[in-house]
Amino acid sequence: MSDSLALLEVSSLARGVVAADAVVKRAAVELLECGPVSPGKYLVLFAGGVAEVEEAAASGAQAAGDSLLDRLVLAQPHPQLLPALRAGARGSVHGAASDAAGMLELLSVAAALRAADAACKAAEVRLQLLHLARGIGGKAWFVLRGDLHSVEAAVLAATQSAGEGLLAGAEIVARPHPDLHGRVL
């Protein structure tokens, strides 16, 4: 279990590789995501112990220099974040098709990670999907499932923690149609 999660968003692909190299050379961290995303940005996402992640993030940010667009360090991320990140864009199958669904779309990956963490900590929901920037214009989105009141509380917490001007949309479907199960939800 990782105690901390960090993200660097870099505007230059080449400088992104340099930043990723600095991250893994600085401390023993696990690279979760490392590569180009839309629209021409480079993501470096990693996890590990708090001190290691903070050191690696500082080193990567310094290496990125003026190309650093955004930086996020989450100490004690909710335990659902890492499995959702590892599952990628395909997400995980949600057993209860009748559970409410909350969908949040954010303009940056850092905002999505921060919002998903807040949502999962605010209410008993399941993080079904966490999609980061690939093929969606640099945006990120995630899907939460659970009983309606929990999903409403989680969506509220996520919207409040997203950051000014970074929330592209938030929707709740109280009882999704069965045809959506396994396709969208």
Image: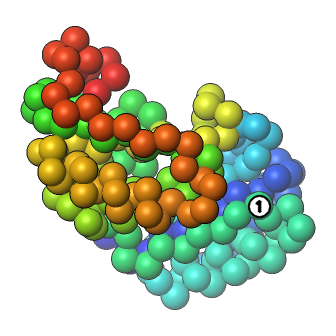
Please tell me which residue is depicted at 11% across the width and 29% down the height of the picture: 98
Front one among 38 and 153:
153
How far from the left and from the top, in percent, is residue 69? Answer: 77, 61
Q: Furthest-bottom residue in view? A: 51
For disc 1, the marked residue is 69
How far from the left and from the top, in percent, is residue 43? Answer: 67, 52
Q: Is residue 96 visible?
A: yes
Please tell me which residue is depicted at 60% across the width and 62% down the height of the picture: 164
Please tell me which residue is depicted at 63% across the width and 55% down the height of the picture: 165
Q: Furthest-top residue in view? A: 179
Q: Furthest-right residue in view? A: 66
Q: Quadrant of residue 137?
A: top right
How far from the left and from the top, in percent, is residue 50? Answer: 47, 83
How far from the left and from the top, in percent, is residue 23? Answer: 67, 70
Please identify the quadrant where the N terminus is shown: bottom left
Is 71 on the left-hand or right-hand side of 167? right
Is 176 on the left-hand or right-hand side of 44? left
How many labels were placed on the picture?
A: 1
